[in-house]
Amino acid sequence: MELKQILHENAYSIVASNGYTSSKPGIKPLIDALDEDIHFFKGLSVADKIIGKASAMLLCLSGVKEVYTPVLSVAGKQIFEKYGVPCEYDELVDHIVNRKGDGMCPMEMTVKDIDDLEEAHEALKRKVASL
């Protein structure tokens, strides 16, 4: 996947096979893209710097074809498996850590007990708006 190389060689947080890139941190690039078109990533390959359950749910909701990430959470991997999305990763972690490094990422916490993709999308939009 050439996206892997583009992600590693640039300061992007996400790269998609349609040319979409962003350097914004966290799930903001995904939220922005899905606000533009809920099927923004349909049929696309995506490389994202860090993927947890929150990002995985948004990518699956959008119809992503395949994913690469250097860091993937166990819950994120389970989402990709559930929806049949091939995912390549370098490191599998228990959960995504917050920016301070002292706990779980707030986006992971937001969807921890949510299984429905659309419900997760709405909860994550509310969480991002509150920050």
Image (cartoon, helix red, strand yellow):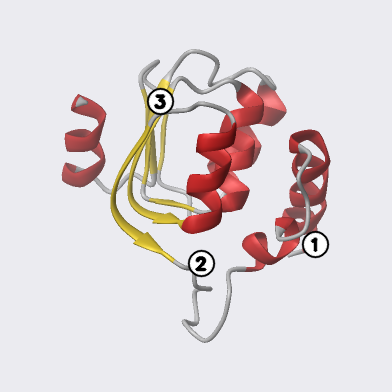
Q: Could you tell me if the residues under marks 1 and 3 are in contact, i.e. CB atoms within 8 Å?
A: no
**102 and 112: which is toward the camera:** 112
Q: Residue at x 58, y 41 (%)?
A: 79
Camera-side residue: 76 or 30? 76
What amino acid does circle 3 point to? Glu
Distance, label 3 to label 2, CA atoms, is: 21 Å
- Alpha-carbon distance for marks 2 and 1? 22 Å
Q: Residues within 10 Å of mark 3 (few under 14, many from 20)?
A: many
Name the residue: 69% across, 22% down: 38
Sequence-first tag of 3 and 2: 3
Residue at 44% across / 17% down in the picture? 44
- Mark 3 sits on what residue? 66
Return the x and y of residue 31 as percentages of the image width and height.
65, 39
- Please identify, in this view, whether the residue under mark 2 or under mark 1 is nearer the observer: 2
Kind of residue indicated by mark 2: His
Compared across the picture, whether 93 is left or right of 76 comes to left
Q: Is residue 26 visible?
A: no
Helix, strand or loop at mark 2: loop
Q: Which mark is residue 130?
A: 1
Q: Is residue 111 above or below residue 105?
A: above
Task: Give the residue number, with chain letter if any, for mark 2.
Answer: 95
Q: Earlier in the sequence, mark 2 or mark 1?
A: 2
Marking on residue 102: none
- Mark 3 secondary-structure assignment: strand
Q: Position of residue 68 (x, y in %)?
A: 33, 37
Image coordinates of residue 67 in percent, x first then y, are 39, 32
Label 1 crowd bin: few (<14), some (14–19), many (20+), radius 10 Å: few
Q: Callout 1: helix, strand or loop?
A: helix
